[in-house]
Image (cartoon, helix red, strand yellow):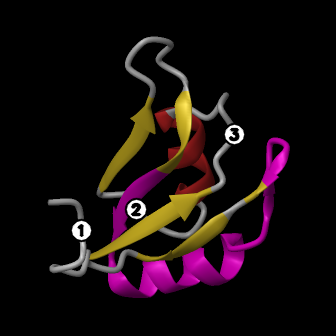
Amino acid sequence: MKKLFVGSLPTEATQDSVKALFSEFGTVRSIEIASDVFTGKCKGFGFIEMEGHEARAAISGLNGKSFGDKYLKVNFEEPRKKGKGRR
């Protein structure tokens, strides 16, 4: 199972619309779209879990593709580095 970061999502994006987009490349195991607490609109990014080979196909097929009025940024999630952060 691989976790993908999806950036540059339009504010109109919903879990259903993003899931439909990624389902073209395989089974979406889980999806989390960051949304604004007050408006409920998409904050522009989210995370998707797919099997490894399906995730790689989704990256090559969707990275840079137009979705709404923006161009998607799709890549593997990189774990946060510990250390330099707010204290």
- The residue sitting at the front extreme is 87
- The residue sitting at the top extreme is 38
Mark 2 or 3, closer to the camera: 3
State the SS at label 1. loop
Q: Quadrant of residue 60?
A: bottom right
Judge the density around disc 2: few (<14), some (14-19), many (≥20) Cα neighbours within 10 Å.
some
Residue 66 position, x and y percent, is 83, 57
Real-space Cα separation, disc 2 to disc 3, in angstroms: 22 Å
Residue 54 on the magenta segment: yes
Q: Which residue is mark 3?
A: 10
Span colored in magenta: 46-70
Residue 79 position, x and y percent, is 26, 78
Residue 70 position, x and y percent, is 80, 51
Kind of residue indicated by mark 2: Thr
Q: Which residue is mark 2?
A: 27
Q: Earlier in the sequence, mark 2 or mark 3?
A: 3
Judge the density around disc 3: few (<14), some (14-19), many (≥20) Cα neighbours within 10 Å.
some
